[in-house]
Image (spheres, helix red, strand yellow):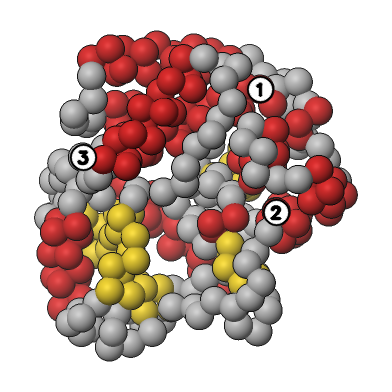
Amino acid sequence: MTETHAARGFSQQDAHEALIAACEHAGLDSRDARPMRLGENALYRLASAPVVVRIARSVDLLSDVRKEIAVARWLEAADFPSVRLLPECPQAIVHEGRVVTFWLHVDSGDPPTGFLDLAVMLRELHSLPKPVELVLPLFDPLGRVESRLDGAASVSEKDLAFLRQRLKDLYAEYNALNFALPPGHIHGDAHKGNLLRRVDGRVIVLDFEVFAFGPREWDLSTGVGIPFKGFQWVGDDEYAKAVDAYGFDVTEWPGFHTLRRIREMTMTTWLMQNVDHSPDIRAEFDRRMASLRHDHLPRVWRAF
């Protein structure tokens, strides 16, 4: 399967068709597979084996997926607590403009992962020596926003014009930042949802699609700083413990406000891709747009 055309749109039916074709190519049984999530990617849990099938919405993301595979293999070789690829299985299969990978399913245990777990994971990940043969792209915090805007459907021209101007403004702010920490490899999408506690209690990290070389402040901002300062999802005590665990308070760094606004932009345009999927998503997108237009409004955002 080596098709190279880009796909437009991404519905559950699109994802399911890619699931069936890719599983057939890999020799896996896709019957009765259970959809787990439809977002930037679609996730399915196979009924026939402990396997999660991950489907990227566009072949334009093929290089990101291949990078993700390389990172996953590095972390496995280093025995870092992370999700594992399905061994001896073809990866980055392309079907009708979708890119498919296969991962070992991990049963989750209690208690749920918290912000302290995330801070500990980031400290350990940032300290892990990166192999010289693994070449990572330079981090672009807004790298997918423009393509999302270009492909936006059912979004008003007024909203799109606002988002395009904000994109330019945020790039200018980001390029002027002076970072306090030395750069290095970063997860790029560090948040609690990309951690999982196994039934044996060990916490593992997921999703390496935007792994890159960049500022460690980004991981700390998206992981704990913005949930604490921007959304009040973290209490004072829990945040203090997270800061102690990593050893740096990103909210005290002068560039934090810019990273917060960038993260809000990426969260909003990510949701924008799915506004036609339900009235709830449309309402949440409208709520986020109102927040972006008024920097001082409280951020009472729902997670999807």
Residue located 15% across and 78% down the image: 24
In the rendered structure, find residue 257 and report the number of the disc placed on it.
1
Which is nearer the N-term, disc 1 or disc 3?
A: 1
Work out whether residue 140 can be spotted: no
Amino acid type indicated by mark 3: Asp
Tag in front: 3 or 2: 3
Query: Mark 1 packing: few (<14 Cα in 10 Å), some, or many (20+)?
Result: some
**Contact check, label 3 and label 2, Cβ < 8 Å:** no
Q: Is residue 131 visible?
A: yes
Can you give x and y, in whole percent of width and height, for residue 196 in the image? 57, 68
Q: Which residue is mark 2?
A: 115
Report the front residue among 62 and 12: 12
Q: Is residue 189 left or right of residue 19?
A: right
Q: Indicate which disc, 3 or 2, sits on the residue closer to the N terminus.
A: 2
Q: Amino acid at mark 1?
A: His
Sequence-first disc among 2 and 1: 2
Kindly identify the residue that appears in the image at 62 percent across and 21 percent down. Answer: 258
Calculate the distance from the C-alpha at mark 2 to the C-alpha at mark 1.
20 Å
In the rendered view, would you say 281 is above or below 193? above
Residue ID for mark 3: 276
* Position above or below: 167 against 143: above
Which mark is on residue 239?
none
Q: Secondary structure at mark 1?
A: helix
